[in-house]
Image: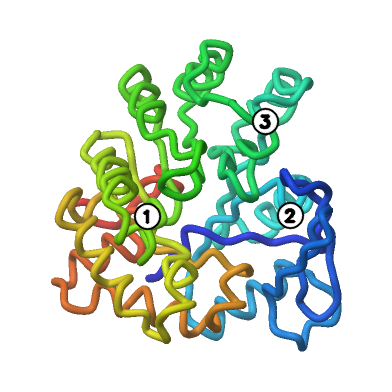
Amino acid sequence: MLIDAHVHIFPEVDGYTSKGKTSSGTFGQFVFGSGEIERILPAATEKLSYTAGYLLQDMDQCAVDKAVILLDPCYGDWSDYVMAVCQKYPSKFAAAGYFDPWAADAVERYETILSKPIWKSIKIEFSQDSGLCGVYPGARLDGQHLDWIWARMEREGKTVVFDLGKPGQPSYQTNAIERIARQHPGLRIVLCHAGQPSLEVERDKDRWMAWINQIQLGQLPNVWFDFSAMPFHVKEHENYPYPSTKRYFLIAFDIIGDRKLMWGSDVPWLLGTASYAQLVSHGKYLVEDMPKMTQDRLLFLNALDVYWPQHTGYPSN
């Protein structure tokens, strides 16, 4: 079995970041409100979209059995679309709901939509560049006015997924996550992209230590990391299979072990870096020298435990 623990789908881009409204450009281009353009899909795609159909084709061709769909403000609130996909393919997909806890209707949205049992996970995209920290400068995840969210999700057995951006950015709130995790030990927490190590981070002592400190959160019983998008952060300096990513992965592995890490691709954004087949092979490359049981934990068992906690039939020891 193989599970991709970090994917996005959308019929078109209709979201927002600190750079303003986002939209679909032509030939795989993502358009920011500022006018900045970034290509995230091959030019063969005339108008930028990455639908469930695209994802299912990629998964089928690469023998990926399940995927976790994360909603993200930069792509837009496609909650209804994603939920319909999950209902149509219940054995294939789990999803983390779209949530902006600083929005004026945050409480109402949680009560009317996200409190429903079908939303077993919730994504808070807090990164500086494309997430809510850039939209709400000075925002803190451990602010008292957010305590109700963590308490509710803990009580309802939900998983919360955070993208905290890059080491050194205001969004990189490791201490806040530690406080939330310790105050709510029943709340499962996933941090994205293995904390975003890179060659630039490695060369900066303070940012490197910030990354190490964040990885150490995985020593807490209720904190996990997905190791998605790692090639993106070294692609300007290295080619496939991006050897530095293996070094960073093994450092994280040595700190938190094989039960707190799970592979993900972060498609479609990463399709501008590598093909889906390459991203799948890259995940296997990172774990290739490890025992079979360890590989299983990293490539699917841990994701099952976090996102499909009701699963049966797979060993956990």
The answer to whether marks 2 and 1 mark residues whose Cβ atoms lie closer than 8 Å is no
The answer to whether marks 3 and 2 mark residues whose Cβ atoms lie closer than 8 Å is no
Residue depicted at 30% across the width and 60% down the height? 202
Q: Amino acid at mark 1?
A: Ala
Using the rendered view, name the quadrant where residue 132 is placed: top right
Query: How far from the left and from the top, in percent, is residue 229?
Result: 47, 65
Asked if residue 194 lies left or right of residue 251, the reply is right
What mark, if any, has residue 194 been given in the picture?
1
Quote the CA–CA distance across marks 3 and 2.
18 Å
Using the rendered view, name the quadrant where residue 9 is placed: bottom right
Residue at mark 3: 136
Residue depicted at 15% across the width and 56% down the height? 254
Evaluate whether residue 308 shows in this view. no
> Quick check: 76 above or below 13?
above
For label 2, count other residues whose C-alpha is less than 10 Å away and answer few (under 14), some (14-19) or many (20+): many
Query: How far from the left and from the top, in percent, is residue 294?
Result: 19, 64
Q: Nearer the viewer, mark 3 or mark 2?
A: 3
The answer to whether marks 3 and 1 mark residues whose Cβ atoms lie closer than 8 Å is no
> Quick check: 279 above or below 296?
below
What mark, if any, has residue 75 been given in the picture?
2
Residue depicted at 80% across the width and 59% down the height? 13
Q: Nearer the viewer, residue 294 or 183?
A: 183
Quote the CA–CA distance across marks 3 and 1.
24 Å
